[in-house]
């Protein structure tokens, strides 16, 4: 039961600078994130297949429908659990079936993967996923 | 019997004399600065000098030979690789890179040892303050062997700083994720001075000076940390979910279904010559 999912690829200069600024914090902390295109973020919408709250980086597996109508899994790498907890996310923030929109930094290789920032994910109704204390 | 008792007495006395002086003093907590609590790094993350931009912006004083290695690392990182940075495979950061706190650290001061418990990658530093010297037969390690000394510059009876020297380090290590290299001889020496900010005791400073043959001169940076009074601690076990692998010197990612993905454009797959492959 896959809900309607869509992918919208759009580059936004303002968004790029915001995401880049955020990424230079937690993201660059463990390893270089140069494999991800930090200058050309894209927005994708999909259904959460799995949210792995694991070290060294959390993983968000998102089912995303492409322009061709084919649904593919996107593997999105985020900050460490310790970073996310302090930014207002926990292991229970996302569950399979949740419909979300996220601004991500895609892999340079073109494979279905990228990096995400907690503050750049929203539920379908517009509510931010991260709830900073 | 009397002879045996005398031998015992002499042996005990000799052991007491042989113990380092610091170990014999009673532990008076009030003499030490308040380093307790959770310390969170301030300034830029993922860089060694947290006042400067990453990569070349760090202005690391590298010798020409090691500047060339660094440039090669930068070129690899620009393509989506990791250069010589070993941490993506879950090798601990080691010293001095661990002083850049990716995640917070707790400091526990005891009479003979000060422990620095780093949340990130569960790294642990033991700083021996019992007056011992560096060992000559220890195997090297990523965190190294640290000997410390509490200092009381004005002889007030209260210590104001902890000076630490770390040696016996193990490679591979880099200064940061961009691949600023340390020398292949692994003879890095790190000298530090920890002290509380005079105006704000919830700020801790760590003045770090690195001596390394990859550098033209010692590299000194100041790390600043702020104290969190209501800490949250999160376990950090790197092998739990690391999706980055190095196969044949190439970096690949593993997707949610456990399949290998390229990290660079047009990257060839790894060799499968040891697998039975069915031709379609």
Image (cartoon, coloured by chain):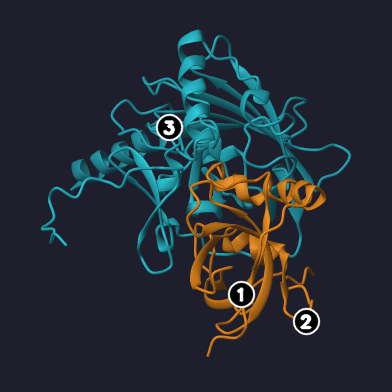
Chain colours: A orange, B cyan
Percent coordinates x, y for residue B237 in the rendering: 45, 60
Q: What residue is disc 3 on?
A: B84
* Picture residue at 27% right of the left edge, 40% below the top: B248
CA neighbours of label 3 inside 10 A, class few (<14), some (14 to 19), many (20+): many
- Whether residue B102 is visible here, answered yes or no, is no
Residue, far bottom? A1
**CB within 8 Å, label 3 to label 2:** no
Identify residue for label 1: A46
Q: Where is residue B262 in the image (x, y as percent from the top left)?
A: 41, 49
Q: Distance between the residues labelled 3 and 1?
A: 36 Å
**Mark 2 surroundings: few (<14), some (14-19) or many (≥20) residues within 10 A:** few
User: What residue sits right under mark 2 in the picture?
Assistant: A125
Left or right of residue A15, residue B216 in this image: left
User: Could you tell me which secondary element the residue under label 3 belongs to?
Assistant: loop
x, y percent for residue A91? 58, 75
User: Which of B141/B241 is in front?
Assistant: B241
Q: Mark 2 lies on which chain?
A: A
Give the letter of the chain under mark 3.
B
Mark whose residue sits in front, 3 or 2:
2
How many callouts does the rendering have?
Answer: 3
The answer to whether residue B83 is seen in the rendering is yes
Q: Which of marks 3 and 1 is in front?
A: 1
The secondary structure type at the circle numbered 2 is: loop
The reply to whether label 3 and label 1 mark residues of one chain is no
Mark 1 or mark 2: which comes first in sequence?
1
Where, by quadrant of the figure, is residue B169 drawn?
top left
- Looking at the image, is B161 positioned above or below residue B72? below
Q: Position of residue B254 (x, y in %)?
A: 40, 58
CA gap between label 1 and label 2 equals: 13 Å
- Which structural element holds mark 1? strand
Alpha carbons under labels 3 and 2: distance apart: 44 Å
- Using the image as rendered, state which of residue A68 and residue B209 is in the foreground: A68
């Amino acid at each position: 039961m896959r809900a309607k999912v869509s992918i919208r690829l759009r580059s936004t200069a303002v968004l790029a600078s915001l995401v880049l600024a955020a990424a230079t914090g937690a993201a660059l902390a463990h390893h270089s994130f140069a494999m991800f295109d930090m200058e050309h973020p894209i927005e994708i919408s999909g259904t959460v297949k799995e949210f792995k709250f694991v070290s060294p980086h959390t993983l968000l597996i998102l089912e995303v429908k492409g322009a061709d109508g084919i649904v593919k899994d996107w593997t999105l790498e985020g900050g460490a659990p310790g970073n996310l907890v302090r930014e207002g996310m926990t292991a229970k923030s996302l569950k399979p079936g949740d419909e979300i929109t996220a601004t991500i930094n895609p892999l340079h290789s073109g494979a279905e993967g990228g990096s995400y920032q907690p503050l750049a994910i929203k539920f379908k109704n517009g509510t931010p996923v991260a709830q900073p204390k | 019997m009397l002879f045996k008792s005398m031998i015992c007495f002499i042996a005990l006395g000799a052991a007491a004399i042989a113990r380092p002086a610091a170990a014999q003093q009673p532990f008076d907590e009030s003499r030490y600065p308040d380093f307790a609590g959770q310390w969170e790094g301030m300034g830029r993350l993922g860089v060694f000098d947290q006042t400067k931009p990453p990569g070349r912006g760090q202005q690391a004083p590298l010798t020409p030979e090691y500047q060339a290695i660094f440039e090669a690392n930068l070129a690899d990182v620009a393509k989506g690789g990791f250069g010589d940075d070993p941490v993506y495979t879950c090798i601990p950061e080691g010293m001095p890179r661990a002083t850049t706190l990716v995640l917070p650290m707790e400091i526990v001061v005891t009479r003979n040892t000060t422990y620095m418990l780093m949340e990130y990658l569960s790294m642990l530093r033991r700083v021996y303050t019992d007056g011992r010297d560096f060992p000559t037969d220890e195997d090297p390690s990523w965190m190294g062997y640290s000997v410390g000394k509490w200092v009381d510059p004005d002889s007030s009876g209260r210590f104001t700083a902890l000076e630490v020297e770390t040696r016996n380090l193990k490679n591979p290590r880099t200064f940061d994720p961009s691949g600023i290299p340390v020398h292949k001889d692994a003879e890095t020496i790190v000298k530090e001075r920890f002290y509380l900010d005079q105006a704000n005791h919830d700020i801790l400073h760590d003045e770090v000076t690195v001596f390394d043959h990859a550098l033209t001169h010692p590299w000194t940076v100041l790390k600043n940390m702020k104290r969190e009074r209501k800490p949250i601690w999160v376990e950090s076990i790197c092998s739990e979910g690391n999706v980055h692998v190095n196969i044949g010197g190439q970096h690949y990612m593993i997707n949610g279904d456990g399949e290998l993905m390229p990290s660079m454009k047009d990257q060839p797959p790894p060799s499968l010559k040891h697998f039975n492959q069915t031709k379609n």
